[in-house]
């Protein structure tokens, strides 16, 4: 087996609330292979989102190690963690988190501006614009380029968010209940899209969900409870295919 | 390095949020006011300095002790190769009564006023017309450019020679010594050329400081008016022949014991002389005969007034600087508002790979663009409105009878202004510094936000 793209070793995360210290992650071990689609299941409050943020370097762990392609990253300076976040990881959130001032196209393009100087971006602006349009076409929104988030449906917003997550060519997408806010029909469409991206582009997914059915279609399931991993399983039909 | 997203987001926020215009407007107004008001002030000060220069001898020897003799001192002064000419001045004080009102009032009954023109009390300046004309601007003072020709002296080479007068009730023409009063005084007291003025004064007897003072009374006739452009001088002085004043003070030219008494000596230097160093040199020249004398340049002669106006300008700068602080606060407030409204965006940007430096730069750029636009707007409008101030003033006066700056109050033909480049640069630098600082605080706050908390912010 090749080297995992992401590893978490004994990750602990505590929050301070006044004098009280709340232990949310109590030593989580996890690894994600390249191209793997992993479902993270757990009851509400189990610490799924917290784990996602810690793994995505948005929030430092209190203890433990995080490795990207074998390299320890949790102690890197903030600047480098930000760069890593940009280069390796795409985020997709339950509530889309698009920038309301920007159109769909602009939201996606913004993803290509995070680690490039203004001058360099200006020289490549044509190429990057074309790429953003291509991704919006991939998610089926080529006719909604100029719409602002407020002028899009929930499903459309999530597609924009997915296109945005893809623009920097990440190796891994961390998705926190990406369909949690959508009706089941729309949710299915969005999920199909995610599975397709995983298959066609070989991008790994860490998919937080409450949905057992959806989890069953992933390569592997990890169950989290009260901040610890309580079980790992392989679903019946591994490598779930949408043709079936 | 400015990352592309910082510039992009700053630009998007600016064009979608009109509230930023407040900051632009605030800084613009502050810069505008600092440029316009101070340039008018500077223009005004320049005008006053020109007027003082016009009204004052280049150098003035003063603070003499004993009974100084003009010829003795002039002798010494002329030894300096750069001294071009010298003229004697003698000062005393007096009250004058126009002929038709001699004794018509014992107390002043006219309304309470602070103008020196309302008192018939003047400083009498005795001059030698010929030497004075060589040394100071006397001939210019007497020419009354574009003014009442009726009050102009008939013969510039003999300015203290009034026309013979024929006072009411008397048949015979009489010839009195001449006196010059300023055009303001002539107008406010309705004096005309040839009008008789009785000058009344007093002096102490020599060596008898406890005794009765001696009354002095002499009748003069007005030979014309002068205008030096220094209001202070014009309102408080009357000019007469130095010999007349010496006689009034008990120094008769025929008297063996009397000297050609002076209280000051006006000095003109060769063109191009540095007046400051010349003044010091002349003082040293006289240090033996007049150890306590002073030689004042025209600026020093008017130092108090110039310092007062300069101080007013300084105060004005301070007041306007406060406006600038308010404008900077406006930037702070709008930027702070932007940051508070955009907390979620900050989280989003972080999740996309923005560093806290990038977030800082985003908001700092926004504040910076506001500050720079405000400065540009203020500088441009400030320079333009200083430049067109007179047109605006004239237009307002023509259409509404209102003036921004009462030119007639200061006898100015136009509002003076002086756009001083160093001052403008100073204003811009000051405005940029404090508004950038004001923008930096909210930007730092944005940069310190924890990404996860920012994302969860509702
Ligand atoms: N910043 C914080 N400060 C204090 N406690 C926190 C903070 N963030 C999360 N928690 C706590 O950590 C626990 C786990 O939260 P988390 O959001 O990770 O749960 P979750 O598994 O994602 O739940 P859900 O399925 O409802 O989204 C919760 O009890 C929550 O109250
Ligand atoms: Mg959650």
Image: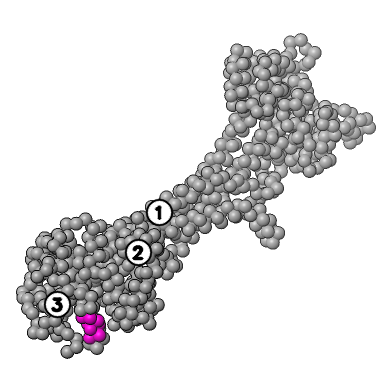
Name the image quarter holding residue B212.
Answer: top right
Residue A164 location, x and y as percent? Answer: 30, 73
Which sits in the foreground, B419 or B138? B419
Q: Which one is earlier in the sequence, the residue at label 2 or at label 1? A: 2
Residue B239 location, x and y as percent? Answer: 75, 30
Which residue is pictured at 83% across the width and 28% down the height? B158
Indicate the chain on which mark 3 is placed: A
Residue A228 location, x and y as percent? Answer: 7, 70
Kindly identify which residue carries mark 2: B5
Same chain for the residues under marks 3 and 2 in the image? no
Image quadrant in which the N terminus of chain A is located: bottom left
Name the image quarter holding residue A198.
Answer: bottom left
Packing grade of label 1 (10 A; few <14, some 14-19, many >=20) is many
Which residue is pictured at 24% across the width and 71% down the height? A91
Q: Residue A195 colored magenta?
A: yes
Left/right placement of residue A117 relative to residue B232 reads: left
Query: What secondary structure is found at the residue carrying circle 3?
Result: strand
Kindly identify which residue carries mark 1: B436
Q: Which residues are magenta?
A: A187-196
Packing grade of label 2 (10 A; few <14, some 14-19, many >=20) is many
**Spatial separation of the CA atoms under disc 1 and disc 3:** 48 Å
Query: What secondary structure is found at the residue carrying circle 2?
Result: helix
Position of residue B263 relative to residue B2, above or below, is: above
**Spatial separation of the CA atoms under disc 3 and disc 2:** 32 Å
Kindly identify which residue carries mark 3: A39
Position of residue A221 relative to residue B393, above or below, is: below
Name the image quarter holding residue B164.
Answer: top right
């Amino acid at each position: 087996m090749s080297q995992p793209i992401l590893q978490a070793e004994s990750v602990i995360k505590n929050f301070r609330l006044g004098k009280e210290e709340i232990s949310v992650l109590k030593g989580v071990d996890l690894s994600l292979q390249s191209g793997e689609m992993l479902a993270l299941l757990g009851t509400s409050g189990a610490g799924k989102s917290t784990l996602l943020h810690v793994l995505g370097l948005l929030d430092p762990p209190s203890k433990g190690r995080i490795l990207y392609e074998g390299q320890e990253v949790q102690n890197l300076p903030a600047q480098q963690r930000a760069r890593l976040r940009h280069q390796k990881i795409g985020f997709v959130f339950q509530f889309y988190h698009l920038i309301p001032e920007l159109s769909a196209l602009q939201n996606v393009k913004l993803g290509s501006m995070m680690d490039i100087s203004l001058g360099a971006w200006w020289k490549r602006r044509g190429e990057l614009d074309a790429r953003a349009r291509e991704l919006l076409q991939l998610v089926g929104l080529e006719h909604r380029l100029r719409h602002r988030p407020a002028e899009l449906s929930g499903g459309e917003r999530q597609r924009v968010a997915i296109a945005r997550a893809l623009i920097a060519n990440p190796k891994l997408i961390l998705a926190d209940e990406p369909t949690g806010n959508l009706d089941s029909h729309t949710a299915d469409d969005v999920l199909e899209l995610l599975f397709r991206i995983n298959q066609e582009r070989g991008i790994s997914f860490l998919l937080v969900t409450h949905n057992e059915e959806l989890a069953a279609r992933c390569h592997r399931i990890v169950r989290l409870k009260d901040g610890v991993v309580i079980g790992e399983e392989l679903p019946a039909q591994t490598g779930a295919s949408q043709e079936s | 390095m400015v990352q592309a997203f910082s510039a992009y987001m700053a630009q998007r926020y600016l064009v979608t949020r009109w509230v930023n215009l407040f900051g632009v407007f605030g800084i613009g107004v502050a810069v505008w006011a600092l440029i316009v008001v101070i340039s008018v002030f500077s223009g005004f000060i320049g005008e006053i300095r020109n007027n003082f220069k016009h009204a004052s001898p280049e150098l003035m020897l003063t603070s003499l002790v004993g009974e100084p003799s003009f010829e003795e001192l002039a002798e010494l002064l002329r030894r300096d190769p750069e001294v071009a000419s010298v003229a004697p001045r003698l000062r005393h004080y007096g009250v004058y009564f126009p002929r038709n009102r001699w004794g018509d009032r014992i107390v002043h009954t006219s309304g309470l006023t602070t103008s020196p023109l309302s008192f018939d009390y003047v400083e009498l300046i005795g001059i030698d017309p010929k030497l004075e004309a060589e040394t100071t601007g006397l001939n210019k003072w007497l020419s009354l450019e574009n003014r009442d020709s009726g009050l102009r002296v008939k013969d510039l080479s003999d300015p203290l020679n009034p026309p013979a007068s024929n006072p009411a009730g008397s048949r015979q023409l009489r010839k009195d010594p001449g006196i010059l009063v300023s055009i303001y005084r002539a107008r406010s007291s309705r004096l005309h050329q040839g009008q008789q003025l009785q000058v009344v004064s007093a002096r102490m007897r020599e060596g008898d400081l406890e005794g009765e003072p001696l009354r002095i009374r002499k009748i003069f006739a007005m030979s014309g008016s002068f205008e030096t452009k220094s209001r202070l001088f014009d309102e408080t002085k009357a000019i007469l022949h130095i010999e007349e004043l010496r006689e009034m003070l008990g120094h008769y030219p025929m008297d063996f014991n009397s000297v050609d008494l002076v209280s000051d000596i006006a000095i003109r230097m060769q063109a191009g002389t540095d007046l400051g160093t010349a003044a010091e040199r002349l003082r040293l020249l006289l240090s033996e005969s007049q150890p306590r004398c002073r030689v004042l340049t025209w600026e020093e002669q008017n130092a108090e007034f110039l310092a007062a106006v300069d101080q007013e300008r300084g105060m004005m700068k301070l007041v306007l600087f406060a406006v600038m602080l308010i404008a900077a606060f406006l930037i702070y407030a709008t930027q702070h508002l932007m940051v508070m409204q955009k907390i979620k965006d900050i989280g989003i940007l972080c999740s996309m790979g923005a560093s806290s430096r990038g977030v800082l730069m985003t908001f700092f750029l926004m504040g910076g663009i506001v500050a720079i636009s405000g400065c540009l707007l203020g500088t441009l409008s400030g320079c333009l409105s200083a430049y067109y101030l007179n047109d605006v003033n004239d237009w307002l006066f023509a259409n509404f009878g209102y003036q921004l700056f009462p030119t007639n109050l200061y006898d100015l033909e136009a509002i003076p202004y002086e756009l001083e480049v160093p001052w403008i640069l100073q204003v811009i630098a000051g405005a940029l510094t404090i508004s950038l600082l004001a923008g930096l605080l909210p930007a730092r706050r944005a940069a310190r936000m924890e990404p996860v908390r920012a994302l969860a912010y509702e």
